[in-house]
Amino acid sequence: MQAFTLPDFYLPYPARLSPHVERSRAHSMAWAREMGMLDAATPDGGLIWDEEALARMDYALMCGYTHPDCDGPTLDLITDWYVWVFFFDDHFLETFKYSRDLAGAQAYLDRLELFMSDTPPEVTSPAEAGLKDLWERTVPAMSEDWKRRFIVSTHNLMVESMWELENIDRGRIANPIEYIQMRRRVGGAPWSANLVECVSAEIPPGLAGERPITVLTDTFSDAVHLRNDLFSYQREVREEGENSNAVLVFEHFLDCSTQEAADLVNELLTSRLQQFENTALTEVPALLAKHGSPPDEQLAVGAYVKGLQDWQSGGHEWHARSSRYMNEGAVTPALKLAPSGLGTTGFLTPGRLGLRRRVSQHSHVPHRPVGHLPLPDFTMPYEVRTSPHLEAARQHSVDWCRAMGFYDSLPGVEAGGVWDERRLRGIDLAHCASMINADATPEELNVSTDWLAWGTYGDDYYPMIFGTVHDLVGAHLCGERLSLFMPIEDGTPVPVPANPLERGLLDVWLRTVAPMTIEARQLFRAGIERMVASWEWELANQAQNRIPDPVDYVEMRRRTFGSDLTTALAKLKTLDVVPGDIYQTRVFRELETAAYDYGCFTNDLFSYQKEIEYEGEVHNMVLVVENFLGVDRMTARDFVADLMTARMEQFQHLADHELPALLTAADLSDEARAAITRQVDNLKEWMSGVLEWHRRCVRYTEPELRRLRAAPDHLPTGLGTSALRVLLG
């Protein structure tokens, strides 16, 4: 029996089938035989695959569905790539996952990577033979930019297999956030997106790293993986003992039934597909306009979007028919008066329309009274330390904000500035800086305090100046100007600041970057630009009255909260000591994002009433969970608290066990090891300091919220004046 009944899938695009499937079936069978894949033995003497097994899995049918418009030779090539990647996955499972041979697995993966080069070693296995052949047949037709991205994707899906293996060895099931971001790397869908470029068109190099393009790729990847997890749960979890599956992750984290978990995974799959559509329709056109992309680049991006859509619909059809998966009931009987045949498996079903999720995201009522949110118990194993220079930094902050004009009236807010001195003193950002930079010198603490003040002021400035009138163009132009006040080269002329935001940025930027290298300045500016762009993202959601997709929210929340900004300075000081590839490892990436999520969710719990009731916001993790799970605020609060605990436990394990092993294996200098250790200690103090600041700060308390909402004596009252009062809140 199936472990659960397959849910009603959101299927917005019809599936189509290539006319070249039969030739690719014959070609891929002959190719797999030539590479030795049909003779590869398992440790117990059986075969990984034989001809019958490969024929049943029918990867030519999958590629015919997912790439319906490519010619015969291209379909052959793409099919061979998928035969290779599924063979790699099954061979790795049989050879290393069951035996828990971690050392052998790492050596196998290290050698396999050498076959993505111009000078590969001698072939010793079918996986090596296949990768060598495919590499030589593929890369001559592609650009260097594509080659670089494809190497990264292939590296990730091979190397991150160790994460799955280590979790099996520990008997550990990942938390939901960790699972989604790790599944992208180990699941291979970003690699599939790269192959879409081979068939449709390459992403123009200048656009590949921009948020709309990365969101298209990430949402595509998440949807592919979540769909695969639903179809493969029976085989992977019940039969093979795997624990890397979204249904199992939800089942374990929420302590719910398998059916309930499967339904939630399908809800998330629908949400990710609709995030894809929202990005394609609202963000991509703006991106092309921003870059002044010529027609050929616009056509390339359009072809890429269409290629990803074809993959989604075709991938579903293949999963519904392949012997590899649990798919009873996936191909529904034809309905009376409804079309039947290819591409109609979800026709006229409620899930096919995806309306429930779309309506839910866009039906939020702003400013609904929610009252104070009782806070949960927080898991915090790290002590708080405070700088001895706190009092001086407090006075410096008050004076600096006054000098930068943060208390001044502004156009559109003539009755009062974004802040006043009383509000600044109540926020007490120097206290926060003194805990996350306890060992700073007096000047370093002043700089850290000023960055917190500038970022918090900007976070308040954008919704007040641009959000109330939905001025997205003005916000974007403001962001473009802000980049001018972060010169990379010394002596670069800058415009005269036109407002407090520009004046404050220029002042604190020049004081911060003086001792930095050019590379460090570029990285630091990029982090600030991402934070500013995330404020624009918030305004766009607010204009659509759209509660964010859960995954997009978590990833963008790290930017809106300024996590990179407030933790970056220590890392930037050691670029000449610590090899850059250390920061790209799973261990360090997960350490950082786990810490960031803990801090961001802390803020969301404390600021729930302020944001939902007083500001009419849609950007709060508690609200996102309420909307996604369909639960009340207290249940959503507990879910967020559980996520924080899970991320903290993950951080502790990484810091105490996996980081020391990584540093030993990397053979770093004592200076580099000390620098990385200090950076991890900084993350600990950042988390404990952020929590303590929220506990002491008046910014989120109900009396302060009421005070700010109350109309000052000099303001008009009566009909038509409510908007002015909202501005002052």
Image (cartoon, grey):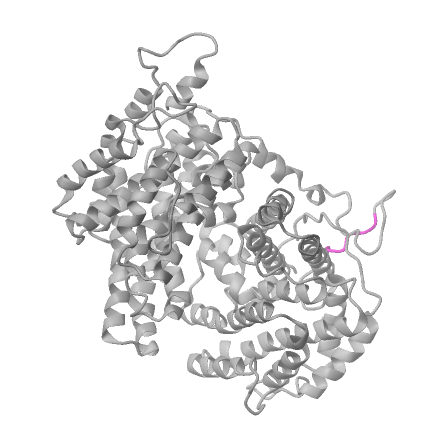
Q: Relative to 718, is 60 above or below?
A: below
Name the residue rendered at 43%, 48% in the picture: 529
Seen as rendered, the residue at the extreme top is 718
Magenta-highlighted residues: 329-334
Does 660 sit above or below residue 596? below
Quadrant position of residue 18: bottom right
- Which residue in the rendered view is the most extreme toward the right? 337
Give the quarter of the figure containing the C terminus.
top left
Q: How many marks?
A: 0
Vertical placement of residue 725 versus 100, above or below: above
- Rendered view: 26 above or below 556: below
Q: Position of residue 717 (x, y in %)?
A: 40, 8
Residues 487 and 382: in front is 487
Q: In this view of the protein, which residue sits in the foreground, 49 or 71?
A: 71
- Residue at 81%, 51% (x, y): give it: 333
Residue 580 can be seen in this image: yes
Q: Is residue 704 left or right of residue 386?
A: right
> Is 531 on the left or on the right of 117, as rendered?
left
**Residue 629 pos. (x, y %):** 52, 41
Question: Residue 507 placed where, x, y %?
Answer: 29, 43
The quadrant the N terminus occupies is bottom right
In the rendered image, residue 660, in percent from the top left (x then y), is placed at 29, 71
Task: Kindly tell me whether residue 538 is visible in this rendering.
Answer: no
Question: What secondary structure characterizes most of the magenta part?
Answer: loop
Nearest the eye: 535 or 59:
535
Q: Residue furthest left?
A: 388
